[in-house]
Image (spheres, rainbow, N blue to C red):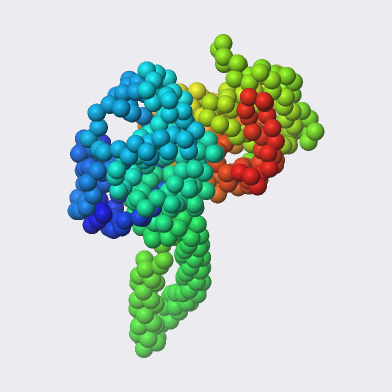
Amino acid sequence: MLQITHLTMTHEKDLTDLVSDLSLVVNKGDKIALIGEEGNGKSSLLKWMMNPTFVNSYIQFNGQIRRDFGQYSYIPQQLPQELERLSLNDYFFGPSDVAFDYAALYRYAKELQFDSDRFADAQLLSTLSGGEKLKIQFIKELAKETDILFLDEPSNDLDLATLKWLERFIQQTPKTVIFVSHDETFLRQTATKIIHLERIKKRLVARTTVQSLDYATYAQERKDQFDRQLQQARNERLEHQKKLARHHRIHQSVEYTVRTTHDATAGRLIAKKMKAVLAQEKRYEKEAAAMTEIPTQEDHIRLYFSEIETLPAHKPIIELVDYSLQVGQTILVPSVDFRFLAQEKIGIIGANGAGKSSLLRQIYRMLKKQASYSIGYIPQNYPDLLNPTASPLDFLTHSPDKTEEERVLTHLASLQFSREEARHPISSLSGGQQAKLLLLKMVLETSPVLLLDEPTRNFSPTSQPQVRQLFQDFKGAILAVSHDRTFLKEVCDRVYQLNQNGLTEIRKDDL
């Protein structure tokens, strides 16, 4: 259906390679996942596969592509503005250059619990919730008579029920599906081939990997290969140091003999020996140059909550009794009862629009007013806390003290930020880099209570195990809104579902 040969994609703005020497064959029925950090070119590659003209304005490319498909379906990260202005009726029944299976249209509406009577509504798409916008796109795009689907972060705004439905659809459809995702569980359930876009060595070098493996096998093999290469590189360097130490002792001994020998014949022999010593040094230099490279991974996260002063285990952080969850004049949940203690880790799930983020945001505001300790917070919308014109250094430092600045720069370097990026405006950073800033902020402030809204959403799937481990090791309290099932199972002690009846505890095995 699709064949790519030796593709390199370069961003015109800074002439940075995003894709390096990619060769790929896409067969009918393949389920191919594009993974990698934010800003690495996944969406651009997805669009280029559909039609190079979609990225011509900012991407240069070299390589060949052969497309053996005609019509395709595409669901972008965000609903395009020209569609936002349409009514539901115009969206579903307006002109189309692709044939529809109308039976499928109504079948998908039923499966996704979207009232098909609304197809003819005059309601504008811009007024729909994020989850509803995704659902109507699935209903329409999947009903088109096409052979290939391109999906860009299809799981981002879905509740768990819809997410599981989508997983089953991808598993069972005979169509080819090429998709971008950060959701580990979703990837494990769906992908049969992986394309991994990385930018290593301070994000200066593009590395593109293709493996015909399911995601779980790919992730494990990648980790095993990294560990083997790292161990081999360390062993070679250790052995090299031992050789150099022995050679240094020989060199010193020969030098001493040269200085203290006055016999001409013996001097010639010693000089010959010194020549051999110097030749050996050249061989050691070549050996060092040929040693196994110490492996690097762009997504490696080295952060630790090392200085947290935990609150007493049974100290209540917040208690809500018959709390009315309200946004503006709209009551989302009439009555919420909730008790959150100082060393609990609690997850909250719920349908799209149930009020999860609103509840977390209101709890954050309450605690900011009444708590005597700092509160760590990652909002769903990063600009709520990040000034787009400030730099990462501005955001993380509280004084012009050079010692503090160097400490922060060291932390940023451990998260793969260059010194230049540390001084660039936050608006120029990818979503994943902004998430790392918020994560580092909480570590530096040693907050004993963390409120997290979709904390893993913008991290690549290969870095998420490290993020989960960070929160697993955290000794304080965590209250997290999340649809990430792996995060909920591995980090949270308990999980609650929010609906019209309030918060109800559910079994993690049911996720």
Identity of the residue furthest to the bottom in this view = 265
| 408 relative to 62, above or below | above
Q: Quadrant of the C terminus?
A: top right
* Residue 110, horizontal then vertical, whole percent: 47, 35
Q: Nearer the viewer, residue 104 or 361?
A: 104
Identity of the residue furthest to the front in this view = 103
Q: Residue at x 36, y 29 (%)?
A: 79
* Residue 450, horizontal then vertical, whole percent: 63, 32
Q: Residue at x 36, y 57 (%)?
A: 210
Q: Is residue 161 left or right of residue 172?
A: right
Q: Nearer the viewer, residue 109 or 155?
A: 109
Q: Residue at x 51, y 24 (%)?
A: 385
Q: Is residue 225 visible?
A: yes
Q: Is residue 50 left or right of residue 190?
A: left
Q: Quadrant of residue 117?
A: top left
Q: Quadrant of the N terminus?
A: bottom left
* Residue 20, horizontal then vertical, whole percent: 29, 53
Q: Is residue 156 left or right of residue 490?
A: left
Q: Is residue 200 visible?
A: no
Q: Residue at x 63, y 47 (%)?
A: 490
Identity of the residue furthest to the top in this view = 329
Q: How many marks?
A: 0
* Residue 446, horizontal then vertical, whole percent: 64, 34
